[in-house]
Image (cartoon, rainbow, N blue to C red):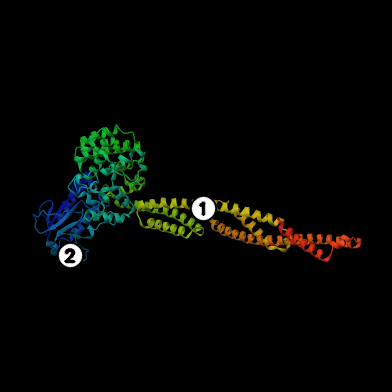
Amino acid sequence: MFLKIVEIPRLKQFLFKTSSHEFDYHLEDLLKKTYYPLSSTVYQVQPKKLVYLNEILYHLKDRFKKFLEASPLPFYIILFKDKDSSEKPRYVRAGKIYLKEEVKKEVLQEFEGLNLFFKIQDWIDDWKELLLPATVDPKLIFFFKDFFFTGENFPCFFCGSTLHPYQKCPGLLEPNPREILDKALDLPFSEVAQKTWQNLIEEEKTPSYFHVRHFYLLPEFLKIVFYRGDNLSSWAQLKLTAETPVRGGSLGIGLEALIKGDLNVAESRFSEEEEDLKASIGLIWVNLLKNNWDKALYFLENSLSKTSSNFIKSYLLFLKGYITEYRGNDLTAKELYQRAFELDKTCFPAFYKLKIFDYLRDEPLEKFINYFVHPFLVFWAWNEPLFIKDQEELENFIEKKLLEKRETALQRLKEAEDLFHRLKHVMTKEEVKDYEEKLKTLAYEIYHKGMGAIDKASDRALDLNLELQSLVYNKIKEMNQKLTELRKQYEVFANFWLRYPYKDEDLIFGKELKALKELIEKNIERTQKRDISQVLSLIVSELNLAEEKVDILKNLKDELRKKWLFKQRLADFLRNFLLLETFLVVLYVLGYFAEFSFLENLLSLPVFLTISVFLLILCLILAYAKNPE
């Protein structure tokens, strides 16, 4: 059995810089002491010697810990039968051991009876992976950053991976990269890592989270530049979910063609309106994708001279800096990033690149990591292959930030929940159900979703709190109106009671009137408290009680009014009738004693009775017509 060391040059250079010769020397020395060398990279493995490979790998990790930190060793190992074999897996991971089925049996025999953990598991195609304690991935969420260093291509312009030429970046194939990134920001980092790995190695049709993370470097971002750029004064106003419907005309057709990769159609359409700023920006991207860097820079300079928008100008300055850096001129690139950032202090891409420059010049991650607060910056850093050494520190920082954001969101949610529980007794069943569902959704997103979703849930919890406070305000307004109406009704009852002459007989009305007055005054005082939400349900309850009192008083008033009317009419009737009857009797007596013959005939008993009946009816009519109020 033979062993072949295959180095990963880009990862090795990134990790060791000028110390790579020391690493090569130690690796070769350890291998030569254990196995028979056939060349500088191929060794023959004697029986029962393969197990020492675990010790060699551990020794290298320990010896070069300050260079590696969280990164794996910058090579992988292939075990094979034929010493002249040049086969290797289509995809590899740094620090791993690969073999084919033909040597599996021999490898199993090597470890037979040994008290050492090992496992042979499927890799890709017909390749296997030998898992040893020294090759186990560290306990990181994004454990496979080394994968992006293992390709043979120059780092991709759009995503930084070496696994494909930049013109074939999977991010270019995504029609809605901003939408994909927005969904990624809402997911837990563990789920993003899992789906990213599936997309990369298992070739499942999952979203290309890694490839679209720098959405502003993809042609689709021109929808924002074309149709939203003039309305944006800074990057802080940029929303991933902003609608950007493509319009007609040469510019719209050209942009659609550019996004779909039809560069000739795009170039033709943009060239029709070359003097237009948008067409000029479109031609930058056409030439970038056609590998015409100088021409792309020409159109970029042309575009810079045509715009006055800070957002578009900072975007173009950043893009110029990025192209300049990609072509190897770091000093000029940094100056351009600085200009973009000075123009707009919320230009996240420029700020991020400036911090990457500092990091690559050996500035510790801890010096600037606290500036990564915005979800964009956190997500970019977490995905950044260049942070491979400090991935553990980075993930610890992100976990801490997540906890802080979650605590803030939960505090806002608690305030909204407390306010809701104080108000639910004054809401309709439909309102209660609606708010309970909203609170339940927010709680789920805060506890189980990613940083972006937590930020959104936190904002929505704050909005919900304001909405509930607005509900309190509206309820106060309603209660004040109700109190005003109750006060008017109380005054009507009070005026009635003031004039009512039989108070001693009907004390119940006075008692209810006094209770109504106390309820009104007490609740007027409560509505003037600072935190009325705490007593809102009590106020509503007592106002309902006050309305019941009003109904009772209305009924009592009707009864008392009838009683008062009856007694007044009865008194009037008796007084009037007695007076008239007395007058009539006196008249009869006078007539009798005077012995007037005409009175004797007139004042006969039948006439007397007739007149009495008439007076009775007249008095009844007069009494009925009287209104004591």
Q: Give how far across and how far down residue 283 sits, in percent.
A: 23, 37
What is the quadrant of residue 558 in the picture? bottom right
Q: Give how far across and how far down residue 112 sits, in percent.
A: 17, 67
Identity of the residue furthest to the bottom in this view: 113
Indicate the secondary structure of the residue bearing disc 2: helix
Task: Identify the amino acid type marked 1.
Answer: Val
Q: Quadrant of the C terminus?
A: bottom right
Residue shown at 71% from the left, 62% from the top: 566
Residue shown at 27% from the left, 34% from the top: 276
Q: Which is more foreground, mark 2 or mark 1?
A: 1
Residue 142 shows up from this direction: yes
Depicted 216 relative to depicted 2: above or below: above
Task: Identify the amino acid type marked 2.
Answer: Phe
Residues at badges 2 and 1 in contact (C-beta under 8 Å)? no
Indicate left or right for 498 with 387 as reference. right
- Badge 1 is on which residue? 472
Residue 390 shows up from this direction: no
Q: Give how far across and how far down residue 374 sits, in percent.
A: 36, 47
Indicate left or right for 525 with 495 as reference. left
Depicted 226 relative to depicted 95: above or below: above
What is the quadrant of residue 104 in the picture? bottom left
Depicted 275 relative to depicted 438: above or below: above
Q: Earlier in the sequence, mark 2 or mark 1?
A: 2
In the depicted view, which residue is nearer to us: 80 or 601? 601
Indicate left or right for 236 with 163 as reference. right
- Badge 2 is on which residue? 111
Residue shown at 23% from the left, 37% from the top: 270
